[in-house]
Amino acid sequence: MEERLGVNVKMSDIAKDVGISRQAVYLHFASRTELMLATVQYVDEIKDVNARIEQIQQAQNATEQLEAFMQFWGNYIPEIYGLAKALLNTRDTDEAAASAWESCMSHLHGMSELVIQSLHAENLLVTHLQPELATELFWALVSIQNWEQLIRDCDWNTEQYIEQMTIVLKRSFIQ
Amino acid sequence: MEERLGVNVKMSDIAKDVGISRQAVYLHFASRTELMLATVQYVDEIKDVNARIEQIQQAQNATEQLEAFMQFWGNYIPEIYGLAKALLNTRDTDEAAASAWESCMSHLHGMSELVIQSLHAENLLVTHLQPELATELFWALVSIQNWEQLIRDCDWNTEQYIEQMTIVLKRSFIQ
DNA sequence: TTTTCACTTGACATGATGTAAAGCTTACCA
DNA sequence: TGGTAAGCTTTACATCATGTCAAGTGAAAA
């Protein structure tokens, strides 16, 4: 998935890579979607996302939390982009993939909410935005699709992405 | 395409809708991708995009130009979303669709550049961004994928989208 | 009257997912 | 030592969408 950036990964490709027959893959996973879901689960564990999120929560103040979040997120997306892309592609025609994607994105929504709430608590949130609306906007701005456009279509590097997105977020949400 | 938001539109569906046989569609368009490309062409003409773009260029100053752009774009996306989505879905596996998408998006890139150049000319562009980088960032922020997340996933309405995105753009790019 | 155009019908190739059945190896267990 | 279960292989087939091909039809134009 990561090698091919989520595109053109057939069941037969996976089987070949593993060194078993295509049919044998179905002895482990009921369908292609199931395999992807299990992989998401696996990656979440391997990458120890929870620990990295807790670290963000321990930032001194809201502004540093925002910065810590962008540092984490900007470095994390490249690690999971292929799988995310594969899930995203399957989403439109597969209900299970759609809800799996939604569940993944709800974590990101939660982290966005965290940052916005912190800003709000410190009276730093721009007055023209209610926290809920601000969270949704924040969430959209840091979406993987946005990253995709900047990194892949515009050839930005991770550093540029983190730096510029941090500035945009600060200017958009901090009073 | 618009009815089904770009998903699950088979050649047989199109044929049925038109009232001819599936094979007859191939007498008019060589492939599904060709049909989509022709539709993009057609829609561009019908919607008279060029006229609407020229109108934006006639704004009094850079700030008004930015506002005019968001007014246009926020109202335009819903009209073409289904087709855009269909193209986007085909892009990953079809070279022709990919380059067609790129060509469509380069128009948007051009409009982003226009706004950024105007800001730059009026010395309003934030100093930490070179015009080129600013254009790319602007372009990403107003992407259809971003619109999709706010309007479809977050249930925003067009008015909200235009208002909030205008604010984000102003805060991010105007000194 | 003939030809051309736009279409129909039916058949078939391809490529991906997914199902099903029978057989083979290896390791373990009584 | 024989039986069995796990994990796989091989072969075959169903389905569904795209796309190709060939023969035929009906109406209008030349």
Image (cartoon, coloured by chain):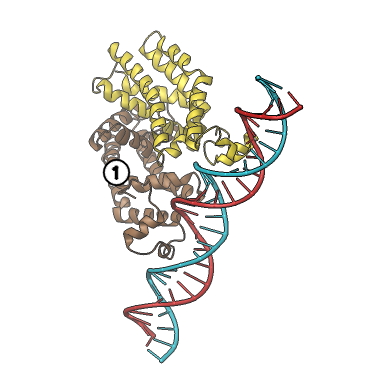
Chain colours: A yellow, B brown, C cyan, D red
User: Could you tell me residue B84's position as x and y percent?
Assistant: 38, 46
Q: In this view, does B147 lie to the left or right of B90?
A: left
Image position of B84 with respect to A44: above or below: below
User: Could you tell me residue A20's position as x and y percent?
Assistant: 64, 36
* Residue occupying image coordinates x 59% and y 36%: A24
| Quadrant of the snapshot with the C terminus of chain A | top left
Looking at the rendering, which quadrant does residue A17 occupy?
top right
Q: In this view, does A130 lie to the left or right of B12?
A: left
Q: Mark 1 lies on which chain?
A: B
Q: Can you identify the residue that label 1 sits on?
A: B78
Q: Can residue B175 be seen by looking at this rendering? A: no
Q: Which of B120 and A56 is in front in this view?
A: A56
User: Could you tell me residue B2's position as x and y percent?
Assistant: 31, 49
Looking at the rendering, which quadrant does residue B119 occupy?
top left
Q: Can residue A57 be seen by looking at this rendering? A: yes
- Badge 1: few (under 14), some or many (20 or more) residues near its Cα, within 10 Å? some
Q: In this view, does B137 lie to the left or right of B71?
A: right
Looking at the rendering, which quadrant does residue B165 occupy?
top left
Image position of A51 with respect to C16: above or below: above
Task: Report the amino acid beneath label 1.
Answer: Pro
Q: Which of B125 and A160 is in front in this view?
A: A160
Count of numbered circles on the image: 1
Q: Which of A40 and B80 is in front in this view?
A: A40
Which element is circle 1 on?
A: helix
Q: Which of A150 and C4 is in front in this view?
A: C4
| Quadrant of the snapshot with the N terminus of chain A | top right
User: Could you tell me residue A64's position as x and y percent?
Assistant: 40, 13
* Residue occupying image coordinates x 43% and y 66%: B27
